[in-house]
Image (cartoon, rainbow, N blue to C red):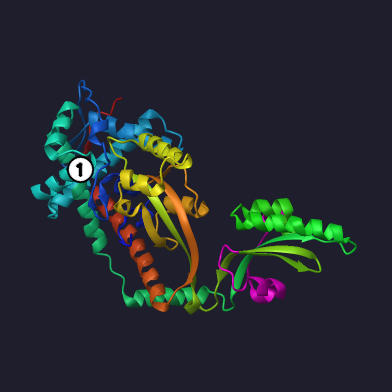
Amino acid sequence: MTDRHHPVRHRARLAGLILALWGAAWPVAQAQGLRLSPNMALRAGPTTPVDADFIVALVNAEPVTNHEVRQATQRLGQQLQQRGVQLPPAEQLAQQALDQLVSEKALVQHAVEIGVRVDDAALLQAEQSVAAQNSLSVEAFRSRLKTEGIDQTAFREDLRRQILMQRLREREVGRVQVSESDIDDALRALQATASREPAVNLGHVLVQVPESASEAQVRSLEARAREAAERARAGDDFAAIARTYSDASEGATGGEFGMRPYSRLPELFVQSTRNLAVGQVAGPIRSPAGFHVLKVVGRQDGDSANARVLQTRASHILLRTGPQLSEAQAVERLASLRQQLQSGQSTFETLAREHSQDGSARQGGDLGWAEPGMFVPEFEQVMNALKPGEVSEPVVSRFGVHLIRVDQRRERQLATQEQRELIRGQLRERRAEEALQSLVQDVRGRAYVEFRDPPRP
C-alpha cells in the first residue's frame, strides 16, 4: 500500500478530545473507500428497550439523549479498559462521553452548513459495502438487521453521519499546503543542528581475555563471545545480552556507547562496522583486551545529503471497532487468529485476505516498505519492537485492532528529492493536526449548547 491516506499511515498525533473525535467518529473510513467491520450489525443482538429516556443537552437545538450518552459511555469505558487505562468515576466517564457527543453533533451540523453532502448513491454504496463484508446481499442484510432488532433508518443515518465526518476531515486536510520554501527552511534547520562529522551509536560487548590466559581459556572466552554474537544476530535484546556477557563498563547499562563521531571510536571498531547497516552485528573481533561484539544501533551522517533511513516492511490484519464490535471482541478474535498462526493451521496472508478490513487484505496484509513516522505512533511503536518474522499480540490503534508481522528491515540512503518529500509529508501532517484541532475548537466554541438534566446510568 502506498496511499498517503492509508489509515495506519496517518501520522496525525491528536490528543484529548480531538483524538477521541477524529479517531472514533468514522471507524468506516479507509484509503480505498468506506468499509465497516464484518458482522458489524450481526453482533448487535436485539436492541434493549430504553425506559424513560430524556434530553440531556441541546446542541444548536438538536437533542442529546440519555440513551445516547449511556451507549457512548459504555463504548468509551471499553476503549479505556482495553488500553489499560484506569476508569474514572462513573459520573466523570459519562461527562466525558457527553462532551464527545456534543462536539460530534456540532461537527456534523457544521459539515451540513458548509455544504458537505452525502447523497443516496453514496449511502447505498456504503450499505452495499457493509452487506458484502457480511457475505450478504443488500436485501438479505436489511432483513438481518430487522431480525436482530436494529432499526434500518437509524442504521443508515449512522452511516450518513460517519461519511459526513470523513468528508469534513478530508476537506480540512486537503486545504493544508506545504510550499517549497517551507521545505527549504526545514532542511536548513536540520543542517544547522546536524553534526558535520559522521557519527554512529554502537552496542558493545567485551569478553575480556587476561594477559596470562591459557589457550584453553582463550578458546572458552571466544566461545562465550560467539554465543553473545549469535544471540545478537538472532535479534535478542542487546541490552540484556550486554548485561549478561560484557565485561566492559557500559555493559551494566545496556552496552551502548551513544552517538559518537568516528574520530572518538577505536579504529578497529570503525573498520569493523563502517559497511554495516543499522541493526547488523560484527564479531567476535579480537583485540589486546579480548573479544568484542558490536551492533550498529544507529547512524548520523554529518552531511544531510547522505541521510539514511531504516525501513521496515510489515503486514497487518485490521479489525475496525465501533458500536457493534468492541475492542474487547476484536482483541479476542485476533488472539484466536494468532493462535492459528502459531499452530500452523493457516498463514498470515490467508488470514489477512479472509479477515482484514483494510485495503491491504488483497495483498495478504502487506503494507509495503515504510519509513519512520509513516504509521501512527501506537502502531509503529509495537512494529519497531518486533523482530523479522514475529507476529505481535493484538494491538489497539485509533483505527481499530491489529495483528502486526514484521517481514523485513533494510537501511537505505535517501536521495535529495526523497528527503524533500519526507519533510513535505511531515510538515503536512503536522499542519493537518493543527487544522483539525483548530476546527474542533472553533466549531464547539460557536455552537449553542444547553445542558439540561445530568445523564443517568
Comparing 147 with 115, the one in front is 147
Secondary structure state at the residue bearing disc 1: helix
Q: Position of residue 282 (x, y in %)?
A: 65, 65
Q: Report if residue 406 is visible in the image.
A: yes
Identify whether 95 is placed above or below 17. above
Callout count: 1
Spot the residue most to the right.
212
Which residue is denoted by mark 1 in the rendering?
A: 132
Quadrant including the C terminus: top left
Which residue occupies the extreme front position in the image? 345
The residue positioned 67% from the left and 58% from the top of the image is 229
Determine the residue positioned at 41% across, 43% down.
346
Residue 141 position, x and y percent, is 16, 35
Q: Quadrant of the N terminus?
A: bottom left
Q: Residue furthest left?
A: 120
Residue 34 on image: x %, y %: 22, 49
Q: Give the left or right position of residue 432, taking residue 61 as reference.
A: right
Closest to the observer, 126 or 365: 365
Q: Quadrant of residue 414?
A: bottom left
Q: Position of residue 38 (x, y in %)?
A: 27, 40
Relative side of 312 to 267, left or right: left
Report the magenta residues as a range: 252-280
Q: Is residue 332 above or below residue 245?
A: above
Amino acid type of the residue that numbered disc 1 sits on in the rendered structure:
Ala
Characterize the local packing of mark 1: few (<14), some (14-19) or many (20 or more) Cα atoms within 10 angstroms.
some
Q: Is residue 246 visible?
A: no
Viewer-nearest residue: 13 or 247:
247
